[in-house]
Image (cartoon, rainbow, N blue to C red):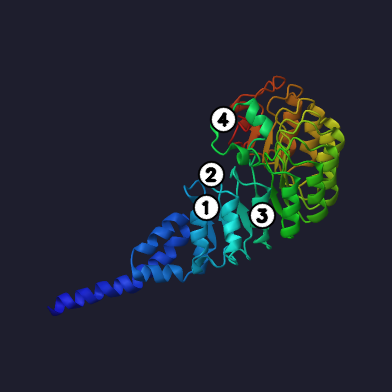
Amino acid sequence: MAAAAAAAAGDEAWCRETVPRVMELVSPRLPQRDACALLAVSPWCHRALVANPKLWEVLDLHEMNKAGDRLISAISLPRYCHLKIINLEFAQDIDDRHFVRLKEMGCTSLQELELLNINACQKVSDKGIETITSLCPNLRALSIYWIVGYTISECFLCHTAPLVSNWWTFCFHRLTDLTIRHIVQNCKHIVDLNLSGCKNISDKGMQLVADNYEGLKKLNITRCIKLTDDGLQEVLQKCSSLESLNLYALSSFSDKVYKKIGSLTNLTFLDLCGAQNVTDDGLSCISRCVCLTYLNLSWCVRVTDVGVVAIAQGCRSLQLLSLFGIVGVTDVCLEALSKHCSRSLTTLDVNGCIGIKKRRRDDLIQLFPLLRCFKVHS
């Protein structure tokens, strides 16, 4: 009996002291959903995990069902009182009502929030952005990629309206320049802004970004098709600290604007895929961005060896370069890249560059010994 009692006491001590300590060490390395599951292992684990504030600085509800209700429930819990990151990406049921409910609750848990990802939350509108950003005054990174919805005319044109139960409100779920106004009014410290796919944002929105976020580090305006030279020019002139600029699938800008990119001395990431108007002159200016490590020139059809040689000579830290689909480049540009960038390039895409004869992997590896990836554009 004594031995059994001693064994039971040992087991209890193990569960009470050792298991919670192990859980505390392991849980930061687990996905948050798994860490939450550990709460139910034992009362001791629950207490140990809840007492670790670092675990509850992140709320990850991406792709989850009923994410809106889960968001409200989680933020009601004391352990989420110092949230830094919320990820709602592709949480399809999230809409304005959930953000309004948080405000009605007098939510203060988002005062320290630094990153909010609501990518592809298609039911969120300008109103939702206004509400949620009003609760996050210290936000530094905001991602609202692909919140597009439909307009009324599009609903009729694609015969969507009869298939959508609440099509009247559905048709208005689209972000506009008003969204940008709400963001700049409520969040003064943004350094990372992802507006990819927000097709109704115009030069007025870019003017607001330029006027309010001079310290901006990252900007993604992929497929923001209403933008013109004027809007981008404002950003380039005033946001001189930019380190990452994504202009993917924007073909309407002129070479005049691309030349101004050369003034961004801190730029490390530049995506110009589909920039049909960028010329060798534009690339010669961009070559002044000596910190560039990532440059996507896929389908920049006016570029020739002259522009790529300038890049090779100026941007000697390049790790990724895509020349996919550029028929005007030849082996001459590869020789220049090999001379100046062979010690850094690990990814080089020359697929579709019919003027380059040394396109086989073996040939490329001879020129660039560090190459590991041969395809960027798909």
Residue type (three-letter) at the residue carrying disc 3: Ala
Residue type (three-letter) at the residue carrying disc 1: Gly
Q: Position of residue 75 (x, y in %)?
A: 53, 62
Quarter of the rendering occupied by the N terminus: bottom left
Q: Residue furthest bottom?
A: 2
Calculate the distance from the C-alpha at mark 3 to the C-alpha at mark 1: 20 Å
- The kind of secondary structure element at disc 1 is helix
- Return the disc, 2 or 1, that comes first in the chain's sequence: 1
Q: Position of residue 185 (x, y in %)?
A: 75, 58
- The kind of secondary structure element at disc 2 is loop
- List the residue tagged with mark 4: 162
- Residue 68 image label: 1
- Residue 92 image label: 2
| Residue 221 figure quarter | top right
- List the residue tagged with mark 3: 141
Report whether 229 appears left or right of 75: right
Calculate the distance from the C-alpha at mark 2 to the C-alpha at mark 1: 9 Å
Neighbor class of circle 4 (other Cα within 10 Å; few <14, some 14-19, many 20+) is few
Q: Are marks 2 and 1 in contact (CB under 8 Å)?
A: no
Indicate whether 25 appears above or below 219.
Answer: below
Calculate the distance from the C-alpha at mark 4 to the C-alpha at mark 3: 38 Å
Query: Which of these two is toward me, 301 or 205?
Result: 205
- Return the disc, 3 or 1, that comes first in the chain's sequence: 1
Give the residue at x 61% y 39%.
170
Calculate the distance from the C-alpha at mark 2 to the C-alpha at mark 4: 21 Å
Indicate whether 73 appears above or below 88.
Answer: below
Res 5 visible: yes
Query: Which of these two is toward me, 155 or 332?
Result: 155
Neighbor class of circle 3 (other Cα within 10 Å; few <14, some 14-19, many 20+) is many
Give the residue at x 70% y 36%.
223
- Return the disc, 4 or 1, that comes first in the chain's sequence: 1
- Return the disc, 4 or 3, that comes first in the chain's sequence: 3
